Image (cartoon, rainbow, N blue to C red):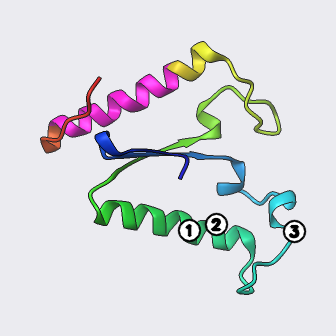
Amino acid sequence: MDAFYAGLNLVIEYRERQHSEAVSFFDRRMTVSGVPRGEQRAIYDLRRREVLLARGIRLIELNVTEFPHDGRKRLRRVPAEDLKVLQQRLAELRSEDRVTGSEVPK
């Protein structure tokens, strides 16, 4: 979990490329339990979603591909573009909240 905003009941998770594809740097070793790291990461990602949902905590998962990045999927850090992505994702959350009756402050 990258950020938790208790007052908003919101978690923000930034998903680097190793969350969606094999990356030898991160996956080169097995875990203590004998599960490959990529598989373990997928299990943890799923558990996080399930636990947060069960506790009524909203989750925004930001993917590296949503932001300006290079060919190796490293962020290029373009503040104006980064801000647009964040504003769009928060607007989507507010839209969902209107349907469910929840509220996300602006």
Give the Cα distance between marks 1 and 3: 18 Å
Identify residue for label 2: 41
**37 left or right of 14?**
right
Residue type (three-letter) at the residue carrying disc 1: Tyr
Query: Taken as a whole, is the magenta stretch helix, strand or loop?
Result: helix
The 10 Å Cα crowd at callout 3, few under 14, some 14 to 19, many 20 or more, is few
Query: Which residues fall within the magenta stretch?
Result: 84-98
Up-down relation of residue 63 to residue 21 (above or below): above
Q: Is residue 92 visible?
A: yes
Up-down relation of residue 8 to residue 42 (above or below): above
The 10 Å Cα crowd at callout 2, few under 14, some 14 to 19, many 20 or more, is some
**Residue plotted at (73% across, 71% down):** 37
**Residue plotted at (64% across, 66% down):** 41
Q: Is residue 96 magenta?
A: yes
Residue type (three-letter) at the residue carrying disc 3: Arg
Q: Is residue 20 visible?
A: no
**100 left or right of 11?**
left
**74 left or right of 92?**
right
Identify residue for label 3: 28
Residue type (three-letter) at the residue carrying disc 2: Arg
Q: Is residue 6 magenta?
A: no
Identify residue for label 1: 44
Tag 1 and tag 2, C-beta contact below 8 Å: yes
